[in-house]
Image (tube, rainbow, N blue to C red):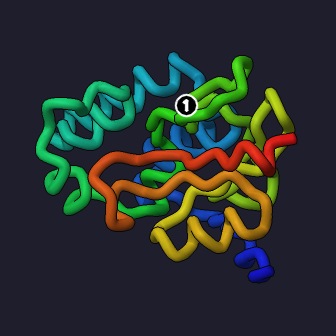
């Protein structure tokens, strides 16, 4: 079984103090609609429309390359609302609705089954996470155009 990657917990999330504060709040409570609204407005005001739409979950019609060119996996990890395909009926089904793990920005916990869900930068990271018995979410820049969660039902019990 592959070892878990080292935890990721950055002290500085943005050089812009206002953006840093909003990102700290989203790291603490990823589903907070008020923070998402204010941060989306800030991004839009700065002309970062693709990022604002991704943050709000309204990016279906956007050019995916614009988002990938204008952001990095660390930022997408904090703000993603990508859907989760899961067979557990009480699963929250979006990355922002999983409970944050205090010492790792790329890991959250499902409130329905208590399994760890890891935000993976690549398909190889996803495979390693699945081998460890975790759930895994692949970033849009990790080789897939759509983010998917692969739930291995045999490991969900």
Q: Element at badge 1?
A: loop
Q: Position of residue 114 (x, y in %)?
A: 85, 39
Image position of 30 (left or right of 57): right
How far across and how far down the image is residue 50, in percent?
20, 41
Instruction: From the viewer's side, name the closer residue of 86 and 104.
Output: 86
Residue lying at 70% horizontally and 19% vertically, measured from the top left: 89
Does 63 sit above or below residue 40? below
Farthest residue to the front: give it: 154
The image shows residue 101 at horizontal and vertical percentages of 78, 49
Residue at 61% across / 55% down in the picture? 136
| Callout count | 1
Residue 65 falls in image quadrant:
bottom left
Location of residue 93 by image quarter: top right
Above or below: residue 74 compared with residue 101: below
Could you classify mark 1 by the number of other residues whose Cα lies within 10 Å: few (under 14), some (14-19), or many (20 or more)? some
For image coordinates 41% across by 47% down, the residue present is 147
Q: Which residue ends up furthest to the bottom in the rendered image?
A: 2
Which sits in the foreground, 114 or 101? 114
* 26 or 77, nearer to the observer: 77
Q: Quadrant of the C terminus?
A: top right
* Left or right: where 7 falls relative to 139: right
Residue 1 place in picture, x, y as percent: 80, 80
Which residue is label 1 attached to?
94
Please report the residue visible at 75 percent of the width from the left and 82 percent of the height from the top: 2
């Amino acid at each position: 079984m592959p070892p878990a990657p080292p935890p990721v917990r950055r002290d500085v999330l943005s050089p812009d103090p206002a953006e840093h504060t909003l990102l700290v709040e989203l790291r603490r409570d990823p589903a907070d609609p008020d923070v998402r609204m204010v941060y989306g407005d800030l991004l839009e005001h700065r002309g970062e429309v693709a990022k604002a739409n991704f943050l709000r979950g309204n990016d279906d019609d956007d050019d995916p390359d614009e988002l990938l060119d204008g952001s990095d996996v660390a930022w997408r990890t904090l703000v993603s609302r990508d859907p989760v395909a899961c067979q557990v009926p009480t699963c929250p089904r979006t990355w922002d609705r999983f409970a944050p793990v205090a010492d790792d920005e790329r890991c959250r916990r499902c409130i329905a089954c208590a399994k760890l869900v890891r935000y993976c930068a690549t398909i190889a990271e996803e495979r390693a996470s699945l081998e460890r018995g975790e759930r895994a979410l692949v970033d849009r820049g990790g080789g897939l155009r759509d983010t998917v969660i692969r739930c291995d039902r045999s490991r969900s019990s």
